[in-house]
Amino acid sequence: MITTTDDNSLVKKFTNFQKDLNLTKTDIIKALKKVFDPEIPVNIYDLGLIYQIHLDENYNIKIEMTLTSPNCPVAEEMPSMVANSIEELMGFNSVNIVLVWDPPWNKDMMSEDAKLALDIS
């Protein structure tokens, strides 16, 4: 079930939760690295769009993320793409994805791999 809140966040409760998988923040990062901005051939984690990942003891996740621009054409789709990538892991109870705009994203937030892929120095 997906719900959207007034504070630009998307909440998705998963029905496939398997606690015995004992997944961690590292698994979340691996899933995030499979999500790509359709306009940029680099995953959202290496682009530096993920600001915070909080995982509580009940396997609920809160992700604070941004987009390259508030006018990004995939602004409405990206949180769902992130939630779906995490749901596929089957080891988490829910995810709350909050879009934030402070600090504003800039190319310095990208990993070195992302900068190399995009030929940015």
Image: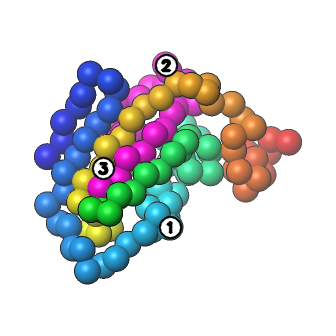
Q: Which mark sits nearer the N-terminus, 2 or 3?
A: 2
- Identity of the residue furthest to the right in this view: 121
Amino acid type shown at disc 1? Thr
User: Dot 2, how many residues are within 10 Å of its Cα: few (below 14), some (14-19), or many (20+)?
Assistant: few
Asked whether residue 84 is in view, the answer is no
Residue at horizontal 44 percent and vertical 26 percent from the top:
73
Q: Is residue 69 above or below residue 66?
A: above
- Identity of the residue furthest to the front in this view: 57
Q: Which residues are magenta?
A: 60-80
Tag 1's secondary structure? helix
**Left or right: 82, with 12 as reference point:** right
Q: Are marks 2 and 1 in contact (CB under 8 Å)?
A: no
Q: CA distance from mark 2 to mark 1?
A: 30 Å
Color style of the picture: rainbow
Q: Is residue 25 above or below residue 68?
A: below
Q: Is residue 56 magenta?
A: no
Q: Picture quarter containing residue 103?
A: top right
Residue at horizontal 51 percent and vertical 33 percent from the top:
66
- Judging by the rendered image, the residue that carries numbered circle 2 is 71
Tag 3's secondary structure? strand
* 79 or 63, nearer to the observer: 63
* 48 or 59, nearer to the observer: 59
**Left or right: 32, with 84 as reference point:** right
Q: CA distance from mark 2 to mark 3?
A: 24 Å
Residue at horizontal 23 percent and vertical 31 percent from the top:
4
- Judging by the rendered image, the residue that carries numbered circle 3 is 95
**Left or right: 73, with 107 as reference point:** left
- Judging by the rendered image, the residue that carries numbered circle 1 is 26
- Identity of the residue furthest to the top in this view: 71
Asked whether residue 26 is in view, the answer is yes
Amino acid type shown at disc 2? Asn
